[in-house]
Amino acid sequence: MYLGLDIGTSVIKAALFDADGRECAEAAQRMQLLPAPVGWSELDGDAVWQVAVAVIRALFAGSIFRPEQVRGIGVTGVMVGAWLVDANGALLRPPILWNDARAQTLVDELAAREPALFSKVFAHSGSMMQLGCTLPVIAWLRANEPETLAKARHLLCAKDFIRYRLTGQIATDESEAAMAPGSAVTRDFHPDQAKLLGIETHVHLLSPVRRGETIAGELTAEAARLTGLVAGTPVAVGTGDTGACVLGAGAHKPGQAVTVLGTTCLNGVLFDSATYEPRDLGLLFIIPGRRWMKTMVNVAGTTVLDWCLSALCPDIAAGNKPYETLGALAETSAAGSGGVTFVPYLSASGVIAPRIEPRARAGFHGLAPHHGRAEMVRSIYEGMAYAIRDCYEQIGGAGEGIRLSGGGARSPFWAQMIADVTGYVVEIPEGTQFGAKGAALCAAVATGDFGSIGEAVEATYQAQRRHVPASELKSAYDAGFARFKVASGATLGVLRDVAV
């Protein structure tokens, strides 16, 4: 039995998996972001630890499983940001998260002095630097909270902080180091990146880098007392949430494609070496087991449905099974939504794929008097499917098919639509807690129960269902995608000038 712990932005989850990768028990608890200025995103770090302890305990409450059955623990979580601790391991301030934008002005100033800043960062990391990445956050702290930075002994990320509380050991993994930003080739931090951001005197705060599928330490007596687990249980280094979800979804071979249709929509293809094409676009995630994933992200994912329920269908939102009812309404309209196109750039931060435009916004196009709510709702589902196709075209295709996970994968209607729109077979993996499963697989390899991450992934994958593209709908969706590209171009062009 292996325990996976997943530290999310708003939900902390834990799950138990057997040797075959089957999900045996799960527990979750929500967290609230702290009140903060607009653009800031912070959590109460000590409260995160308390919730992590609570969800671990909940796994065994009234369960047939016992803590002594746990052979290893893996931890994953939201990446980058900054969890500053002092010499005693105490947090010095509320952790700053991945989606924090406070460094915008500072980064703008750096880019004004060095117009090639983002390209130089990309040349090492293979990723377009986001404002919530660790190094720009350090730069902001240096400029605005130097006294806090001076007291700091270590700068951790979410999973690394929780693992430190479990084991007393400081470490991070390759995925966090490369996304800091660092180097995708060496899978480590890179001194030139710190110099670009003017923080080379603070690199001593960064943690030693270890492979995610190795042991970081053992559960301390104090952590065992709090969690109810057995002292001495091995704890793996683990990996960031993207890599963990990819492994949990059963993908590890070069050429495999994974879409995580959650709060954001992440679309990536695995490679056996660092790939930098297309240049200055997308993110390059480090995956345990010497893999890299070239990724394009539509910032809005299932949030488009939440907005639809709130803004267009409050009656459905107030009823039972709102998502199922919304999908049923969409199905009453034909493929192509009667010519209505929705561009799903429904985020205050705009879009980062197929190009970066912070002022891009969502919109309906092609509306006519005869259109009704059904066409608009269906166009929202289709718009996300077209955005997924657009992202994969930027990468160069999705190989033999797409592994689809995240909340959106629960909808057979949407999954089939994605298959029809992209032309790829869409496979839904068995299970629900893919991040926790990926972390647990790191633990299974670290304890020696599998010889490699690839072996662990292959041995524990099962498909729940497959969606094969319907050939009779190809022409309708190809025409819809052509309309989407025109509408997307307008959104990224003329409309950006009036976005607020």
Image (spheres, rainbow, N blue to C red):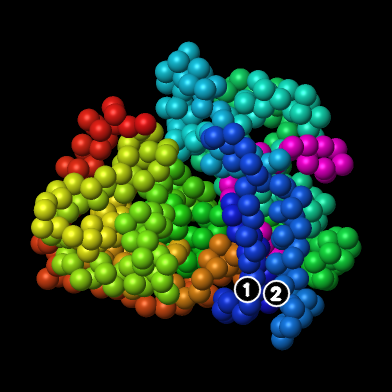
Residue 296, visible in the rendered structure: no
Amino acid at pointer 2: Leu
Q: Nearer the viewer, residue 217 or 301?
A: 301
- Could you say which quadrant of the image residue 143 lies in? top right
User: Magenta segment range?
Assistant: 72-93
| Above or below for 104 versus 425 | above
Q: Residue furthest bottom?
A: 64
Residue 151 in magenta stretch: no
Quarter of the image that includes the N terminus:
bottom right
In percent of width and height, residue 155 lies at: 71, 38
Query: Residue at point 32% right, 36% down?
Result: 360
Query: Residue at point 26% right, 69% down?
Result: 329
Earlier-in-chain disc, 2 versus 1: 1
In the picture of the structure, the residue carrying the numbered disc 2 is 59
| Above or below for 262 versus 187 | below
Marks 2/1 in contact by CB < 8 Å: the verdict is: yes
In percent of width and height, residue 10 lies at: 59, 54
Query: Residue at point 49% right, 34% down?
Result: 129
In percent of width and height, residue 187 lies at: 57, 43
